[in-house]
Image (spheres, helix red, strand yellow):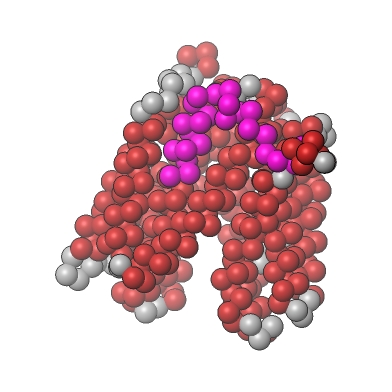
């Protein structure tokens, strides 16, 4: 019984074997907590300043283009320079942007336009940083531990996604926006200190200057690898065809349970955390493409069933299952990318991934309107 339970628990071997992975994991958890705290406080402040749903929605519009453009450039950058420097530089910029939010919130009459500028800046930094983070994992973790590392990283992200918004709601309600933004600044200061302790990660084969030619080279490589294109296509299809978040307010009203709205938004993260906490078995999976397809199919099926049910608790259970399916698919994708992509191209392929995870949900929200 104990052996069976141990087989389900997360594989901690990357944590035990790699000092840099431990540093990066803790750094990411702290940074995600700070980021998600600001992500909740920022739209709340826009709402308070304007009272306009359109003004709040405009924040998403100003975030999308910098994320896509900087994601592609960040991929080329991650293959050309020391990935540690990219991560460190963007963390410093994110801390400075949080400082702008703090100063603005302390003004007698906070201004609106800096909030949009910061939102665009944060999105740009995220686009630049994500490829370097993704590409660094395969450099610091042994090949046979990549699936376990993906599960631990996913758990880190989901913990931040749950704790950050919850803390932000309480902090803003009881202490105000300045305290929420000060919390974010402190998180990024600590994150930068941890990044300084990471080992250098210079580019493979000396690297080359980031360029459009380099980005095109990465796209050509992805096009030449059907298995990689398949993972992008499956993820994009799942998000475009079955991304239900914009329907949650209407679903909660239809079920006569407006109190359940917050739970609906959190259910996916709960499912992802549960899958991460019982992910030990995924390290023994060999057919990672099948893992991607089954996870995405589970996501879509669970969302479809949730739309047919009339009991709010069963709906929430389906959304938890959907989150677990999405996490399973994500673990398979991460393993395929990290195990099969050459190190000198890994950043550019991670940049293409940014397009997949940013554009898919946006198109899915448009389709559901």
The residue lying toward the viewer, choosing from 70 and 15, is: 15
Figure quadrant of the N terminus = top right
The residue lying toward the viewer, choosing from 316 and 48, is: 316
Relative to 339, is 203 on the left or the right?
Answer: left
Residue stretch rendered in magenta on the structure: 7-30
Q: Quadrant of residue 88?
A: top left
Establish if 306 lies above or below 349.
below
Magenta stretch encompasses residue 4: no
Q: Position of residue 184 (x, y in %)?
A: 35, 52
Establish if 130 lies above or below 167.
above
- State whether residue 107 appears in this view: yes
Q: Quadrant of residue 288?
A: top right
Q: Position of residue 159 (x, y in %)?
A: 54, 51
Give the residue at x 20% y 63%: 106
Give the residue at x 57% y 30%: 15
**Residue placed farthest to the front in the image?**
2
Q: Position of residue 250 (x, y in %)?
A: 63, 80
Magenta stretch encompasses residue 21: yes
Relative to 118, is 135 on the left or the right?
Answer: right
Figure quadrant of the C terminus = bottom right
Q: Main secondary structure of the magenta part?
A: helix
């Amino acid at each position: 019984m104990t052996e069976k339970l141990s087989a389900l628990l997360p594989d901690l071997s990357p944590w035990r074997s790699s000092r840099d992975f431990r540093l990066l994991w803790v750094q990411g958890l702290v940074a995600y907590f700070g980021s998600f705290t600001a992500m909740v406080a920022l739209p709340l402040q826009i709402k308070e300043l304007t009272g306009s749903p359109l003004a709040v929605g405009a924040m998403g519009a100003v975030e999308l283009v910098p994320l896509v453009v900087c994601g592609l450039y960040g991929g080329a950058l991650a293959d050309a320079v020391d990935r540690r420097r990219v991560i460190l530089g963007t963390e410093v910029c994110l801390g400075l942007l949080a400082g702008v939010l703090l100063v603005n919130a302390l003004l007698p009459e906070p201004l609106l336009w800096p909030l949009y500028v910061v939102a665009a800046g944060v999105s740009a930094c995220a686009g630049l940083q994500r490829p370097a983070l993704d590409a660094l994992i395969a450099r610091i973790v042994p090949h046979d531990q990549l699936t376990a590392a993906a599960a631990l990283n996913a758990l880190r992200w989901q913990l931040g996604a749950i704790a950050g918004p919850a803390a932000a709601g309480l902090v803003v309600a009881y202490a105000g926006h300045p305290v929420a933004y000060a919390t974010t600044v402190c998180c990024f200061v600590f994150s930068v200190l941890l990044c300084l302790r990471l080992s250098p990660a210079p580019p493979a084969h000396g690297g080359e200057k980031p360029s459009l030619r380099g980005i095109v080279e990465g796209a050509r490589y992805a096009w030449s690898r059907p298995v990689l294109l398949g993972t992008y296509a499956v993820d994009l299809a799942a998000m475009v065809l079955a991304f239900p978040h914009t329907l949650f307010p209407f679903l909660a009203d239809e079920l006569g349970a407006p109190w359940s709205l917050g739970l609906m938004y959190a259910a996916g993260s709960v499912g992802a955390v549960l899958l991460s906490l019982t992910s030990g078995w995924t390290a023994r999976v060999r057919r990672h493409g099948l893992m991607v397809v089954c996870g995405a199919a589970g996501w879509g099926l669970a969302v479809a069933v949730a739309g047919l049910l009339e009991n709010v608790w069963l709906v929430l259970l389906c959304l938890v299952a959907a989150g677990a399916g999405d996490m399973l698919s994500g673990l398979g994708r991460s393993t395929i990318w990290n195990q099969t992509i050459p190190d000198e191209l890994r950043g550019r392929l991670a940049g293409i991934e940014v397009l997949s995870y940013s554009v898919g949900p946006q198109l899915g929200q448009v389709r559901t309107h």
